Amino acid sequence: QVQLVESGGGLVQPGGSLRLSCAASGSIFSINNMGWYRQAPGKERELVAQITSGGETSYVVSVKGRFTISRDNAKNTVYLQMNSLNPEDTAVYYCYAHIVEMGRATYGRWGQGTQVTVSS
């Protein structure tokens, strides 16, 4: 069973930075797209950033120029560097990965979520 484990959330002041990590483990053959979503209280979950296996990236408009998604394929890990954080970035952040297992089964897997709070 493949699992995604996130780390790096916390409390930060406006203008500060955080780096989120998400490591996949288990019977993994390869990982296609990986991404970060977030869900604020009372709002729907939204895609923040995603990265293909080839390294192509895309971002929601509100984080362009402030957030950077990257991945280390050798470690099956995706990162989200978040700079110039503001209170509107406060949310639970979830990583997502499209997994190809050793047996070639394919499916999406979510991390458990990590809280990011931006407040003075």
Image (cartoon, helix red, strand yellow):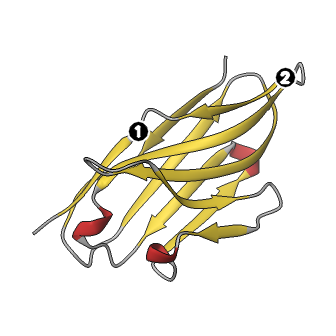
Residue wearing tag 1: 113
Identify the disc placed on residue 46: none
Residue annotated with mark 2: 105
Q: Name the spot of residue 49 as percent of width and height, x first.
A: 57, 62
Residue displayed at 59% across by 42% down: 96
Q: Secondary structure at mark 2?
A: loop
Is residue 5 placed above or below 16 in the rendered structure? above
The quarter of the picture where the N terminus appears is top right
Q: Quadrant of residue 102?
A: top right
Q: Mark 2 to mark 1: distance in Å?
A: 24 Å
Tag 1: amino acid: Gly
- Residue at the extreme left: 120
> Closer to the camera, 19 or 61?
61
User: In which quadrant of the rendered view does residue 24 lie?
Assistant: top right
From the viewer's perspective, tell me whether residue 105 is left or right of residue 42: right
Q: Is residue 1 left or right of residue 56?
A: left
78 over 88 or under it: above or below? above
Q: Is residue 80 above or below residue 104?
A: below
- Estimate the x, y position of residue 14 in percent, counting from the top left: 21, 74
Residue at left 9%, top 69%? 120
SS of the residue at dot 1? loop
What residue type is disc 2 on? Ala
Looking at the picture, tell me which residue is in the foreground, 85 or 27. Answer: 85
| Dot 2 or dot 1, earlier in sequence | 2
Q: Name the foreground residue: 25 vs 108.
A: 108
